[in-house]
Image (spheres, coloured by chain):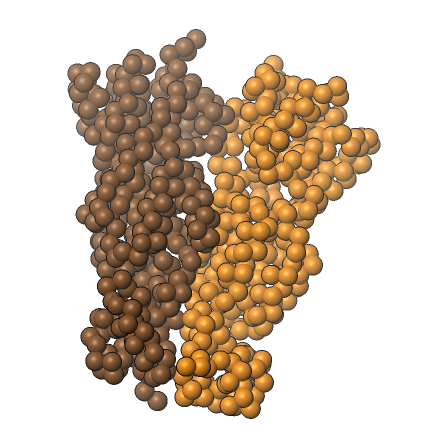
Chain colours: A orange, B brown
């Protein structure tokens, strides 16, 4: 038996496939008269839609997805929690997906979501995201996407971040004011918007205080823990004495602590450390860690608010917008000048 | 227009509703001939199923859910990661849900999953789970459930845990051997299987070393952080000097560290601390924290293995089974006797 498809429906109603599809998705672009006509014909012909797609969009999945690179970073846990606080208000469920900071897995998840399983998506992209095809397709299919933290500038939608450039500047300036002259920057990925901005802030501060920029002080870390450790070790035992370290993300600061313990390098006496971090145990570490504390909960909350406002309006595209919520410098012992 | 339902299909095929439903779910209890008959009739009559349910179960959602009480506990992050490693082998997606350790939210998530959105569920229940109705309904509806860590003994299925009783004994014995005489137990919830077993292990060790059990040394903590802090503070400033603390979960150990910092109580000189914990920063804390380290990754992996074995076989019920993977005592400075 031939299974009735969109083409058959288009033929029977004398409406284009694209309009039939939109009508079944309850798009605002289609008149309610046309919608009624299409739905009646779909029922008459026994059209069985893709279970998760179009036809049932007006029943709404009452679900949003939050896609993050990793769960071992407290930043993302807090951002998810912020998004959940808003979802709860709207009686929505939140599906959490982790990409393990891997673009292939991210693409597979986005593909999986393209059939309308969720009403909208909040995403912080992986470090090696190199294609926007999937994201663009989702948006074109009418599934709204809002970025937070690790954003794609190229895509037209709302993006919620912290003031990465200014915070990178503040972090570096704090090290300079604490007496550091040879400051290393631990980069997590050249591809990431947040990393680029934090590094630019670092350069800006060096420039303000007339400190020569030394390319060998930019340590390019990545996904592999062991490689990161050996790069940090090489830096700390190198000819040029590093007296300050600015870690772009929390896990690189923790790795530096471990390496310093191993090499019996005293923090903050021998080297001072500051990191972007939302670590719960930052104040319990030995020594307590000076951080740029991001408003992760608020960022997740704001991104969700934009998404839900949009879902309530049923518009097809979220306006391009950059929302910035400022981070806070929290000074602790890892940058202390009192090193008796 | 009357919407064709299961009853109509049953009438038209002269098969019971329950068998029609099973046939549409591709149950092994139904012959393939009957399945063909039912599906043909369903298509002929234009039967539109619940988008996420029965009819499409044979298309499989290729998705499992992992439900955990919280993401701020590294134990659950690692368990999820273990489950994901298996799901990846089977090209399945993992949806992560958090209950915020709240039974109401847990019930709502289970309800949400009852329509076949996922092929199976791994769950660690919330501290206040007091009804098994939803879980039983899911299992009866043919959605397999495997418990890990925080289990429900009453439900017949596979349960993967660590050796909570023996580990509770080992933790307490370690404190006793480190010279502690007045050992407090920080309980997270009377309702939880893991808490009860860990506490029993604590009693057993006290008993072995002829240490009188003091009811006032059982500190009943809960979800509220502030109440926990004030209970711990009260314990540490009380008339009876506590010289050893066994925290049932990581967050209670961290709270104790903060309270000790505030009260200027020296760990391990004034009080020694051990905790069940999978904290990444356990060895970086001041002082480093002695832990009962759970094989969280392996527990998540094992639970997922059982679920996928079951999904491959398409049997309707997972056999009752208790799988135990042992924890490891990791001695660090918080229980050190070298307190010069």
Q: Position of residue B86 (x, y in %)?
A: 42, 45
Q: Position of residue A291 (x, y in %)?
A: 59, 35
Q: Is residue B164 visible?
A: yes
Identify the residue at the far top of this view: B340
Out of B304 and A62, give the one closest to the viewer.
B304
Left of B139 or right of it: where is A119?
right
Q: Position of residue B240 (x, y in %)?
A: 25, 20
- Residue at 31%, 54% in the rendered image: B313
- Residue at 44%, 32% in the rendered image: B279
Out of B145 and A82, give the one closest to the viewer.
B145
Left of B279 or right of it: where is A275?
right
- Residue at 35%, 23% in the rendered image: B329
Out of A259 and A1, give the one closest to the viewer.
A1
Q: Position of residue A89 (x, y in %)?
A: 42, 61
- Residue at 75%, 25% in the rendered image: A181
Quarter of the image with the C terminus of chain A in it = top right
């Amino acid at each position: 038996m031939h299974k009735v498809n969109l083409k058959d429906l288009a033929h029977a109603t004398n409406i284009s496939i694209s309009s039939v599809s939109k009508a079944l998705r309850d798009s605002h672009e289609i008149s309610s008269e046309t919608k009624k006509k299409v739905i009646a014909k779909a029922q008459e012909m026994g059209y069985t839609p893709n279970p998760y797609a179009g036809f049932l969009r007006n029943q709404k999945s009452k679900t949003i997805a939050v896609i993050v690179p990793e769960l071992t970073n407290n930043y993302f846990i807090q951002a998810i929690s912020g998004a959940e606080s808003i979802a709860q208000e709207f009686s929505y469920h939140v599906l959490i997906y982790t990409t393990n900071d891997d673009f292939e897995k991210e693409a597979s998840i986005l593909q999986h979501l393209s059939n309308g399983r969720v009403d909208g998506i909040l995403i912080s992209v992986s470090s090696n995201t190199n294609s926007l095809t999937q994201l663009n397709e989702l948006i074109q299919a009418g599934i709204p996407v809002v970025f937070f933290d690790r954003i794609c500038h190229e895509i037209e939608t709302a993006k919620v971040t912290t003031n990465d450039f200014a915070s990178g500047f503040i972090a570096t300036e704090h090290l300079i004011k604490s007496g550091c002259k040879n400051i290393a920057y631990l980069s997590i990925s050249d591809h990431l918007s947040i990393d680029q901005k934090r590094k630019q802030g670092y350069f800006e501060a060096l420039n303000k205080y007339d400190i020569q920029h030394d390319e060998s002080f930019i340590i390019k870390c990545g996904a592999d823990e062991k490689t990161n450790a050996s790069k940090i070790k090489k830096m700390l035992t190198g000819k040029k004495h590093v007296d300050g370290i600015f870690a772009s993300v929390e896990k690189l600061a923790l790795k530096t602590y471990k390496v310093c313990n191993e090499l019996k390098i005293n923090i903050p006496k021998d080297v001072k450390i500051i990191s972007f971090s939302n670590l719960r145990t930052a104040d319990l570490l030995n020594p307590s860690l000076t951080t740029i504390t991001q408003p992760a909960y608020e960022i997740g909350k704001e991104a969700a608010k934009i998404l839900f406002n949009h879902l309530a309006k049923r518009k097809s595209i979220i306006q391009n917008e950059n929302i910035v919520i400022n981070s806070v410098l929290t000074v602790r012992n890892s940058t202390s000048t009192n090193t008796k």
